[in-house]
Amino acid sequence: MNKEMCLVEVHLIKRTENGIKYLLMKRSDDEKFPGVWQMITGHIEPDETAVEAAVRETFEETGAKAVNLWSIPHVNSYYNPEHDKICTIPVFVTEVDKSFSPQISAEHSEFRWVNIHEAVNLVAWPGQKKSIEIIEEYFGNRLSQLILLKIR
């Protein structure tokens, strides 16, 4: 594992009659960043790749199996003062059936399926907003020239 690649970000989406819906989960009060709305996030373990971490975290946090997984052409980053390093965060998206209902972990207290406008307004960090906009461009716009790399 690249030591600067600390986390993964995975957006769970589903197609509905009203467009793409994004799963956002509210962090529990006893977690870091309590009350923050976010997509699936998690640490990459020392023995796994970013893709393996994305699949594992998706299942752990929602119960979903990431059968189809795309890499988003956007990488988030943050400064980790604990280790005095910049961490990069690869961004992925997986699509679930419109009937899927997540079984969220104790890390989160509630979830919502939201449209792009709600999603962009609920997430806290600019990089996450950008990820959502890129996903919407690809999955919500049939005329998009954007091509995503399908990993699985």
Image (cartoon, rainbow, N blue to C red):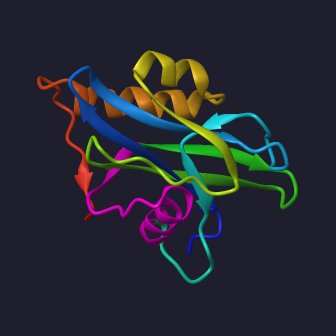
Give left or right: position of 131 versus 33.
left
| Point 36% across, 30% down: residue | 21
Q: Position of residue 16 (x, y in %)?
A: 24, 29
Q: Position of residue 121 (x, y in %)?
A: 57, 18
The part of the image, by quadrant, that contains residue 136 is top left
Q: Position of residue 137 (x, y in %)?
A: 28, 26
The part of the image, by quadrant, that contains residue 147 is top left
Instruction: From this view, report whether residue 23 is shown above or below residue 142.
Output: below
The part of the image, by quadrant, that contains residue 26 is top right
Instruction: From this view, report whether residue 8 is shown above or below residue 108.
Output: below
Give left or right: position of 148 versus 117.
left
Q: Position of residue 86 (x, y in %)?
A: 70, 52
| Point 86% across, 51% down: residue | 81
Answer whether residue 148 is magenta in the image: no
Quarter of the image containing the C terminus?
Answer: bottom left
| Point 16% across, 30% down: residue | 145
Extreme residue toward the left, this view: 143
Stretch of the chain drawn in magenta: 51-73
Answer whether residue 54 is magenta in the image: yes
| Point 64% across, 62% down: residue | 4
Extreme residue toward the bottom, this view: 47
Nearer to the camera, 4 or 35: 35
Give left or right: position of 37 versus 18.
right
